[in-house]
């Protein structure tokens, strides 16, 4: 549902600018975010999201500013039911960092286009669109119980075959998808662990950050054990 326009575009941009800090800008730069940003923390983004509510028209205007923080907020307040294929394609073409890819994946996963865009974007040679597609597969594996194991088996084979040849941040997302499939159920766990052993170490350059790529096999085993003990 629409919020009714609690804030307009100018008010939101002003608020984002006031929320931004140089420390956050430094952090985001290390994560590959381009210069057109205010540096707003996710805590403040979420607070603003709650204040605005769902406002699709405002989301479209915020994305069009090409300001990183405004674009992230746009994915938070856009109405999933009002998404169409052309909007998602337009937004996907504007991606220029893995941070924004993750934000778009979060929004797309709430729409009826999740599977379609996952299959389409996952084949992309582009780093950011490709990453978004594989993140959608991870979300699908963790959320939708109706898909048969065979569907994920197909993608496991692709991950095993292609992960080392895909672009940097796509490898990271494919590794996440591998993990998500591995913790979906017992049968897929066996298949994902076998794939992880054949894949071996996944090299991802995380830049000037402390982020590390999780070992898929170890992560799957740890998660399954924790679930059994809970």
Image (spheres, rainbow, N blue to C red):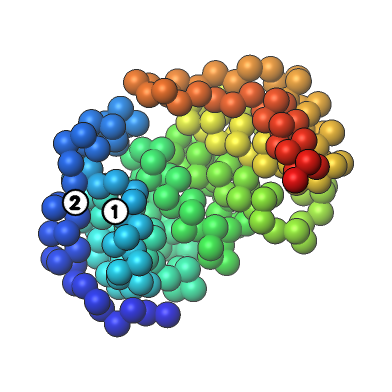
* Residue at 33 percent of width and 79 percent of height: 3
Which residue corresponds to mark 1? 44
Q: Is residue 77 left or right of residue 212?
A: left
Q: Is residue 114 left or right of residue 199?
A: left
Question: Image height check: is 53 above or below 93?
Answer: below
* Residue at 70 percent of width and 25 percent of height: 218
Question: Image height check: is 6 above or below 118?
Answer: below
* Residue at 67 percent of width and 30 percent of height: 219
User: Which residue is at the front of the view, 179 or 163?
Assistant: 179
Question: Image height check: is 105 above or below 162?
Answer: below
Q: Which mark is residue 19?
A: 2
Position of residue 120 measured from the top left corner of the image (x, y, whole percent): 57, 49
Q: CA distance from mark 1 to mark 2?
A: 7 Å
User: Which residue is at the front of the view, 53 or 65?
Assistant: 53
Q: Is residue 48 left or right of residue 186?
A: left
Position of residue 21 measured from the top left corner of the image (x, y, whole percent): 18, 41
Mark 1–mark 2 contact, CB under 8 Å?
Answer: yes
Q: Which mark is residue 4?
A: none
User: Can residue 166 be seen in this snapshot?
Assistant: no
> Which image quarter: residue 91?
bottom left
Local SS, label 2: helix
Number of marks present in the image shown: 2
Position of residue 126 measured from the top left corner of the image (x, y, whole percent): 45, 36
Position of residue 107 measured from the top left corner of the image (x, y, whole percent): 46, 58
Question: Image height check: is 197 above or below 142?
Answer: above
> Which image quarter: residue 174?
top right
């Amino acid at each position: 549902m629409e919020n009714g326009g609690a804030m307009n575009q100018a008010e939101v941009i002003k608020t984002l600018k006031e929320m931004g800090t140089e420390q956050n800008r430094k952090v985001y730069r290390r994560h590959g975010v381009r210069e057109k940003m205010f540096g707003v923390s996710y805590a403040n983004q979420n607070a603003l999201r709650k204040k605005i509510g769902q406002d699709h028209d405002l989301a479209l205007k915020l994305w069009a500013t090409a300001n990183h923080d405004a674009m992230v907020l746009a994915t938070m307040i856009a109405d999933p039911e009002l998404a169409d294929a052309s909007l998602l394609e337009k937004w996907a073409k504007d991606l220029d960092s893995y941070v924004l890819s993750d934000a778009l994946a979060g929004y797309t996963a709430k729409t009826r286009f999740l599977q379609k865009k996952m299959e389409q974007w996952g084949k992309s040679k582009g780093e950011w669109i490709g990453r978004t597609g594989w993140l959608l597969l991870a979300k699908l594996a963790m959320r939708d119980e109706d898909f048969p194991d065979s569907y994920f088996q197909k993608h496991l084979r692709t991950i095993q075959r292609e992960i080392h040849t895909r672009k940097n941040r796509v490898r990271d997302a494919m590794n996440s998808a591998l993990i998500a499939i591995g913790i979906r159920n017992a049968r897929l766990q066996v298949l994902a662990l076998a794939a992880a052993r054949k894949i071996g170490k996944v090299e991802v350059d995380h830049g000037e950050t402390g982020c590390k790529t999780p070992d898929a096999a170890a992560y799957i085993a740890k998660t399954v054990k924790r679930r059994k003990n809970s």
